Amino acid sequence: KVTASVQVPLKVEVERRKRLFSNQDITLLLGSEGVTRSMLAEAFGTDAKIPLRMLDDRDLEPRTWSEWLAAGEEGAAFKFLPARAFCVKARSWRPCKVVERKAED
């Protein structure tokens, strides 16, 4: 007798959500929550830095920091991780690079 489970394994669900999110337009997502480009420009100055803890969800991210570092390595040296950031001057989302990480206290 075979019994089918209706619960999807966590790794499968995480991968599905990552794929879904990667295909989303962040401007539309924020807009649906009432966040405008003007609000972002006002909230973030040219030197704004957002702590990783505000963006990191350990329940949905299966990679460890070591795995992320390995993804950003070229040869034996860490180069960068690709990302997206809000450009205040242009008021648009642009590709950016994560070039370093401050160790947590």
Image (cartoon, helix red, strand yellow):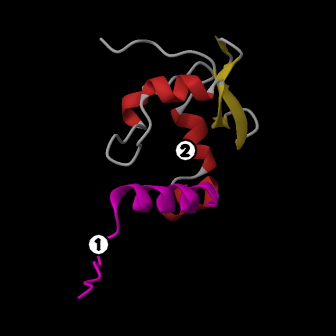
Question: Depth-wise, is mark 1 or mark 2 nearer the camera?
Answer: 1
Mark 1 vs mark 2, CA separation in Å: 39 Å
User: The residue under label 2 is which amino acid type?
Assistant: Met
Q: Is residue 104 above or below residue 65?
A: above
Determine which quarter of the picture holds residue 25.
bottom right
Seen at 34% across and 69% down, the residue is 8
Does residue 7 show up magenta in the picture? yes
The label on residue 39 is: 2
Element under disc 1: loop
Q: How many numbered marks, from 0 up?
A: 2
Regarding residue 34, the answer to whether it shows in the image is no
Element under disc 2: helix
Q: Earlier in the sequence, mark 1 or mark 2?
A: 1
- In the picture as drawn, the residue positioned furthest to the bottom comes out as 1
Going by the image, does 13 lie left or right of 59?
Answer: right
Seen at 36% across and 30% down, the residue is 53
Q: Which of the two residues, 97 or 64, is positioned nearer the viewer here?
A: 64
Going by the image, does 20 lie left or right of 94?
Answer: left
User: The residue under label 1 is which amino acid type?
Assistant: Gln
Does residue 75 show up magenta in the picture? no
The label on residue 7 is: 1
Q: On the rendered image, what quadrant is the N terminus found in?
A: bottom left
Seen at 34% across and 15% down, the residue is 104
How far across and down, in percent of the image, does residue 32 sit? 52, 64
Read off the magenta span: 1-25
How far across and down, in percent of the image, does residue 50 sit? 47, 27
Q: Is residue 2 above or below residue 87?
A: below
The label on residue 75 is: none
Determine which quarter of the picture holds residue 41.
top right
Disc 1 packing (10 Å; few <14; some 14–19; many ≥20):
few
How far across and down, in percent of the image, does residue 105 sit? 29, 11
